[in-house]
Amino acid sequence: MLLRPNTTRQPLARAIARVALGLVLAIAGVGHLTAQREEFQAQVPDWVPLDKDFVVLASGVVEILLGLALIALPRYRKLVSWVVAAFFVAVFPGNVHQYVEHIDAFGLDTDTERLVRLFFQPVLVVWALFAGTDGNRGSRPTGTHPDSA
């Protein structure tokens, strides 16, 4: 179940993926609040009914919190990973906006580079889901199979 704390150990590769993604999110969140603030503002679509600076600051705080949650709350990794995946889906329109409006930011100064970046957002979603699971779909702890009574 998604909301239930996980009590099993996570395989090492997935734990590394979880911590690495947590660090990436936290570092990106700090970028929202500091040196990359203007570049992130350029990605906020004009149709968003909030101040662009507020959106960048708020999303930066959310990224930092999600990154820290991935690292510090391993028992809730499944829930947190789903929230992170949803976050990546929610911010995708900003990447599309950057491509459609031909906005140079983050070293992406051609339409080809901006288009290629769009294909990395699904990779982030998959990374988040991979990092939050144990990789043993449908498995049960030893001795809980109906035939083991």
Image (cartoon, rainbow, N blue to C red):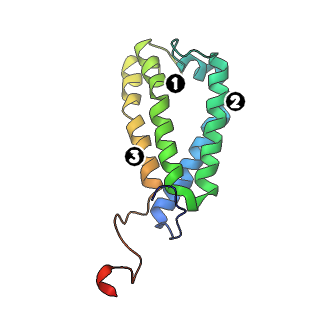
Which of the marked residues, 2 or 1, is nearer the chain's N terminus? Answer: 2
Q: Callout 1, which amino acid? A: Gly
Cα distance between the residues tagged 3 and 2: 26 Å
Q: Callout 2, which amino acid? A: Leu
Q: Mark 2 and 1 residues: CB-CB less than 8 Å, in contact?
A: no
Which residue lies at the image location 49% right of the left edge and 14% below the top edge?
Answer: 103
Picture disc at residue 33: 2
Which residue lies at the image location 38% right of the left edge and 63% below the top edge?
Answer: 135
Q: Residue furthest left?
A: 147
Residue 117 visible (yes or no): yes
Q: In this figure, which residue is indicated by the disc labeled 3?
A: 126
Percent position of residue 37, x then y: 65, 24
**Closer to the observer: label 1 or label 3?**
3
Q: Quadrant of the N terminus?
A: bottom left
Q: Callout 3, which amino acid? A: Val
In this rendering, the answer to whether 16 lies above or below 128 is below
Residue 36 visible (yes or no): no
Cα distance between the residues tagged 1 and 3: 24 Å
Q: In this figure, which residue is indicated by the disc labeled 1?
A: 107
